[in-house]
């Protein structure tokens, strides 16, 4: 990867470093000073932007060009299906980028192709956003401000009712850097400590205890899961554990993961893995990551790094301690007594048990017998199992449970809510069907478990 320093690029562009830094800041590019390095493609983008900015002054009053098909097919080819995204009537470029996981600069660049000059904080209307993201293979749907939205209206938060809740953690990183092994190590260490011989049931999320505190791990750390959930507007993760193999260093999916986490505003803890290997070089990983703004504390930064060997079960306890530390600083809270709601992490049709879904409770306490609705699915909570496979009667905020009793299979990312009766749940689900009928040709991206597990 060749790189160019900020001052070098400024010189090339014939502008001052200060001016370039201010442009970079406006584009939300993480840089520290004129000595910071920029990736090649970022440098190219800036060069294009600056030269087009100069040129656009002449073409400003021309009619916008008709959008051309995206030239960079790379972005499109990773998303073979059209993905649906729900957007508000107005959205900033920055937020839009984070919803669809496309760097805002790319959106700005595309808008320029349409003859529009905007900055990262500019808000564009729904129709423009729709046109824009179509270029990246997304289908936009306007947020419903109708009856259904009225029915879905959330209760007001009651600050005095907020109590601490466990952190929800997602493990991300480049393929083969050890995400699966690390999750296994965390679970096993935990099981061994508390109930030796216990069998971990797969429900898509797991719950571990450390020093009497709970940490929840989403087991589907595939970037696709993260993307699909986020594209639907669901925020599930409080902390990202970024796994980087000490012998391999920063790789493309490492950078992708950093971008996902940053776009979502989620703190990152770096787990430098495979420190048992002869070629391990944790210092090099730190060096590389500091280029992306992840600077270790010993170098004056605020990112926590933990050396681990997932394979040899080294550093796991420290990692869990650090997660609890970051969680404590984040002051994660929820109202345990509110009407329960949460998000569907994954769902499937089980031959024997019918539709089952893993729900991450985000608010209130979900109980057996509650009337529930999640997208097109409704029902009554018939039974719930925790991540160890034990039947439970209730689930509090941040706790993942497998829920049985849905009329059909909801989608990952659907919001699940408790309503006052099964009748009301059915009415809401019917309304959902009605509203979505005319849009049935656009399929909601279902998170395919097989595909995710391929990639964990
Ligand atoms: P993932 O693709 O990120 O989920 O990576 P995996 O967990 O599947 O690990 C990829 C490979 O690296 C497997 O062969 C693991 O056994 C190996 N591996 C994972 N963690 C370690 C480690 O700490 N040390 C060593 N030596 N190998 C590891
Ligand atoms: Mg894997």
Image: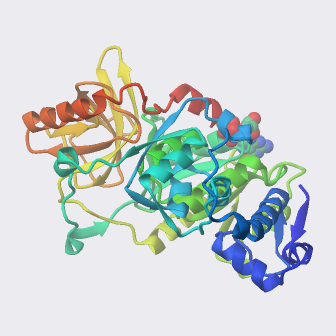
Residue located at (58% from left, 50% from top)? 101
Q: Nearer the viewer, residue 292 or 124?
A: 124
Residue located at (23% from left, 25% from top)? 407
Q: Nearer the viewer, residue 83 or 56?
A: 56
State the residue lying farthest toward the top.
351
Q: Is residue 398 visible?
A: yes
Is the residue 76 above or below the residue 57 in the image? above
Q: Is residue 380 visible?
A: no
Is the residue 180 above or below the residue 80 in the image? below
Choose top left, top right, bottom left or bottom right for residue 56.
bottom right
Residue 320 percent coordinates (x, y): 55, 59
Indicate the colouring scheme.
Answer: rainbow
Is the residue 32 above or below the residue 380 in the image? below
Residue 65 percent coordinates (x, y): 64, 49
Residue 81 percent coordinates (x, y): 56, 29
Q: Nearer the viewer, residue 39 or 189?
A: 39
Ligand 1 position by quadrant:
top right
Residue 205 percent coordinates (x, y): 45, 42
């Amino acid at each position: 990867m060749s790189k160019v320093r900020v001052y070098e690029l400024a010189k090339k562009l014939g502008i001052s470093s200060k001016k370039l830094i201010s442009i970079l800041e406006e584009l939300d590019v993480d840089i520290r000073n004129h000595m910071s390095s920029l990736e090649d493609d970022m440098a190219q983008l800036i060069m294009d932007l600056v030269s087009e900015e100069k040129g656009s002054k002449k073409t400003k009053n021309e009619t916008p060009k008709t959008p051309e098909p995206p030239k960079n097919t790379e972005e499109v080819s990773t998303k073979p299906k059209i993905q649906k995204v729900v957007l508000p009537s107005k959205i900033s470029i920055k937020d839009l980028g984070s919803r669809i996981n496309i760097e805002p600069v790319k959106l700005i660049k595309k808008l320029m192709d349409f003859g529009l000059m905007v900055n990262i904080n500019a808000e564009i209307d729904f129709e423009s956003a729709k046109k824009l993201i179509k270029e990246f293979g997304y289908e936009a749907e306007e947020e419903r401000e109708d009856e259904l939205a009225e029915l879905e209206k959330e209760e007001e938060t009651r600050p005095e009712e907020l109590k601490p809740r466990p952190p929800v953690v997602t493990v991300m990183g480049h393929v083969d850097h050890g995400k699966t092994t690390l999750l296994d190590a965390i679970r096993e260490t935990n099981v061994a400590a508390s109930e030796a011989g216990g069998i971990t049931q797969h429900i898509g999320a797991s719950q571990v205890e450390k020093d009497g505190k709970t940490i929840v791990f989403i087991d589907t750390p595939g970037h696709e899961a993260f993307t699909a959930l986020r594209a639907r507007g669901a925020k599930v993760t409080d902390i990202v554990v970024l796994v980087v193999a000490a012998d391999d260093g920063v790789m493309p999916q490492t950078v992708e993961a950093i971008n996902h986490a940053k776009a979502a505003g989620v703190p990152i803890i770096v787990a430098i893995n495979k420190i048992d290997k002869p070629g391990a070089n944790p210092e090099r990983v730190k060096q590389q990551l500091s280029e992306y703004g992840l600077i270790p504390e010993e170098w004056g930064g605020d990112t926590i790094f933990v050396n681990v060997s997932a394979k040899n079960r080294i550093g796991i306890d420290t990692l869990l301690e650090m997660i609890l530390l970051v969680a404590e600083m984040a002051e994660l809270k929820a109202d345990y007594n509110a009407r329960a709601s949460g998000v569907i992490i994954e769902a499937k049709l089980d031959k024997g048990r019918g539709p089952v879904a893993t729900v991450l409770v985000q608010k209130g306490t979900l109980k057996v017998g509650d009337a529930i609705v999640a997208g097109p699915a409704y029902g009554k909570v018939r039974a719930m199992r925790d991540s160890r496979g034990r039947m439970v009667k209730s689930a509090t905020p941040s706790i993942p449970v497998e829920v049985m009793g849905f009329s059909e299979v909801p989608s990952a990312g659907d919001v699940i809510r408790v309503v006052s009766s099964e009748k009301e749940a059915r009415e809401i689900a019917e309304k959902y069907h009605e509203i979505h009928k005319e849009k049935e040709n656009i399929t909601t991206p279902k998170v395919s478990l097989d595909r995710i597990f391929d990639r964990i």
